[in-house]
Amino acid sequence: MALLFVSDDREYLLDAGDRLETDLGILEVPEDVSPGDTVETHLGTEFVARKLRGPDLFNHFERTGAPMMPRDIGLVMGHTGIAQGDRVLDAGTGTGVLSAALGRAGVDVLTYEQDESFAAVARENMALAGVEDRVDVRVGDVTEHLDDLATFDVITLDTADAAVVVEHAPELLVPAGYVAVYSPFVESSHDVVDTAREVGLEAIETLETIQREMDFGDRGSRPSTAGVGHTGYLTFARNPV
């Protein structure tokens, strides 16, 4: 089991028995290390072992592109009510950040990724997150398998052809099930909304996800002057009861 070893602003992802050589000294990780243990380098620098949590996984997953941000994942889970025991069909796995978050919440995920090398990385990330038994990463175009799939509680999509899947959402979703589509461009969201209306989905809404940090100083508090954190657009729709 990989653990995060932290010392001030340094952190390293290591397994029991690993050896790490840094300018802070050589860190020999004991075989019986547990979260909360303190391990010293040969120069006396202390590192604390931590169990990996969601933000740590986001920071240390191997990347195959721009992953969905935590703010977007939170909106997907909050607006669809995804919960333990649900079945989710996902497409556009990428790094697998969303699939891992859902798996850690007790959700069973079937996710499709067209790039075989991306899918291989996603499987490694699922193993790191400890959800390889809950997240089934398959290689292929989900639109070619729609007739073979059962029904799902939620569909999550991060693909250019998301509207094609949304067209089949009434048959793929359980009654009152949700579809959530992430789109980097508003034109794609427009296509999804039009399709959702045509096939009779309800409660259709599109949100732009923006986030700003706050700066707190001696003179006062204000929003950060750094760039506004726009990531993309999320469209939600619901199957009729």
Image (cartoon, rainbow, N blue to C red):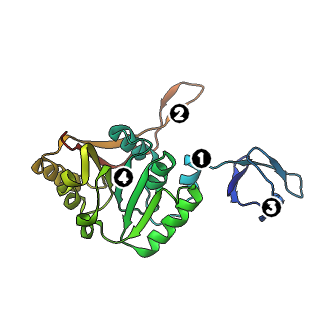
- Please state the horizontal and vertical placement of residue 57, each as a whole percent of the image: 57, 53
Q: Is residue 240 left or right of residue 96?
A: left
SS at mark 3?
A: loop
Q: CA distance from mark 2 to mark 3?
A: 32 Å
Q: Secondary structure at mark 2?
A: strand
Say which residue label 1 marks.
Answer: 53
Q: Earlier in the sequence, mark 1 or mark 2?
A: 1
How many angstroms separate mark 2 from mark 4 (CA)? 38 Å
Q: CA distance from mark 1 to mark 2?
A: 26 Å
Which comes sooner in the sequence, label 2 or label 3?
Answer: 3
Task: Report the mark closest to the observer, 1 or 3.
Answer: 1
Are discs 1 and 4 less than 8 Å apart at CB? no
Looking at the image, tell me whether mark 1 or mark 4 is earlier in sequence order.
1
What residue is at 25 percent from the left and 64 percent from the top? 146
Residue that carries the numbered disc 2 in the rendered image: 215
Q: Are marks 4 and 3 in contact (CB under 8 Å)?
A: no
Give the x, y percent position of residue 217: 58, 29
Q: Amino acid at mark 3?
A: Asp
Q: Which mark is residue 23?
A: 3
> Is residue 187 something that shows in the picture?
no
Residue at 33 percent of width and 38 percent of height = 79
Q: Nearer the viewer, mark 1 or mark 2?
A: 1
Residue identifier under label 4: 88
Earlier residue among tags 2 and 4: 4
Q: Foreground: 209 or 111?
A: 111
Q: CA distance from mark 4 to mark 3?
A: 45 Å
Q: Which amino acid, by three-letter code, is at mark 2? A: Asp
